[in-house]
Amino acid sequence: MKTFKIAALAGDGIGPEVMREAIKVLRSVEKKFSLGFQITEAPVGWAGIDAAGKALPDATLARCQQSDAILFGSVGLPDRDPTIPKEERPERAALLRMRKEFGLFANLRPVRLPKALSHTCPLNPDRQGSGIDILVVRELTGGMYFGQPKKTEDLGNGQQRAIDTMVYTTAEIERIAHVSFRAAQSRRKKVTSIDKANVLENGVLWREVVTGVGKQYPGVALEHMFVDNAAMQLMLKPTQFDVMLCENMFGDILSDEAAALAGSLGMLPSASLGTTSGEQTFGFYEPAGGTAPDIAGRNLANPIAQILSVALMLRYSFQLNDAAAAIDSAVAKAIDGGLRTGDIFNPADPAAKRAGTREMGDAIAAGI
């Protein structure tokens, strides 16, 4: 039996609650498919500060380095100790450092709206079609967020100038393009590449390189779309999209816009992938939502995003596609059966049954 090493970093707020349910589901998968998961829990975020004085303790980082993948909860408590320097706050000291430490260059955010949850979507039903299913692939380590120079200058006379530089190389664009085309091969075989080639030099290079990579995937259709039009099309006709390929800033904005289509952040997982060694790709898997301290500890949080992040981990880091599909099916079964946490509950639906965090996790684990 092959054993996969997983670092489980629950973090703050609702993180420990939803992580508990994710591990419960992972143990069901382990039993059903005769797999071995060595899961080691470690503190991060404010839990890390309390345990070891910093958001990403050395022991936690070492544990991640010894693992095959990281299953992450959420970090950050906005009302706690506002005097701490921004560089030491969990959102930067933990998350951004992890991206850099592990070379996590590809962020995958699937956005799905099951028919049973159409009431949670802000769009009219006629725009939802038979269900929304989009994968946003965002380049994560380049672009304006990391380009140099990046600074604020004093111009005198009370005037300042802020400079951010948008930089991409051919190699950076090629590797994220390959991720998107490979993902499209197992979906509906279409990539929409997002740029601003009519204004930005980066956009021109982005379009040229993506077009070249696309020729290596003759079974996948490629279209290019300006980012402003893409933002509009997500609201007008989201069902036209399969895989959306975006540079860092555009992907940051559009993935959050697309997330609104699913009605609740509690339904949205994400994967951040690094390089591939042999058959395994190192990855960092987390729900798209935050720590939600207002409902922490009250058995109210929706654990589905964390549980679906486990499915992404099995699929992308371990190539356990059958096990990942079993989780997806178990989630669908719970939803189709009417089980609802508060964020997706519709009191007008007579078939809807309220469930807490634990009850939802139990049902999905049983569905495995």
Image (cartoon, helix red, strand yellow):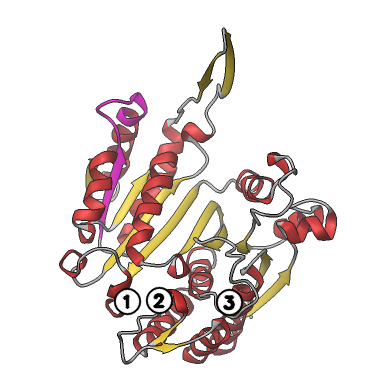
| Amino acid, disc 2 | Ile
Q: Give the distance between the C-alpha atoms of the residues marked 1 and 2, in whole angstroms.
A: 7 Å
Q: Give SS at disc 2.
A: helix
At horizontal 74% and vertical 50% (from top left) the residue drawn is 81
Residue that label 2 marks: 344
Q: Residues within 10 Å of mark 2 (few under 14, many from 20)?
A: many
Going from N to C along the chain, the mark reached first, 2 or 3, is 3
Q: Position of residue 186 (x, y in %)?
A: 33, 64
The numbered mark at residue 322 is: none
Q: Give the distance between the C-alpha atoms of the residues marked 2 and 3, in whole angstroms.
A: 19 Å
The residues colored magenta run: 189-204
Q: Please say if the residues under marks 1 and 2 sit with CB atoms less than 8 Å apart.
A: yes
Residue that label 1 marks: 117
Q: Give SS at disc 3.
A: helix
Q: Residues within 10 Å of mark 3 (few under 14, many from 20)?
A: many
Going from N to C along the chain, the mark reached first, 1 or 2, is 1
Determine whether, in the image, residue 273 is placed left or right of residue 198: right
* Front-most of residues 360 and 327: 360
Q: In the rendered view, would you say 130 is above or below 240?
A: below
At horizontal 40% and vertical 46% (from top left) the residue drawn is 253
Of labels 2 and 3, the one closer to you: 2
Residue that label 3 marks: 22
| Amino acid, disc 1 | Leu
Q: Give the distance between the C-alpha atoms of the residues marked 1 and 3, in whole angstroms.
A: 21 Å
Which of the 4 quarters of the picture holds residue 194?
top left
Determine whether, in the image, residue 207 is placed left or right of residue 356: left
At horizontal 27% and vertical 66% (from top left) the residue drawn is 132
Residue 165 in sight? yes
Q: Please say if the residues under marks 2 and 3 sit with CB atoms less than 8 Å apart.
A: no
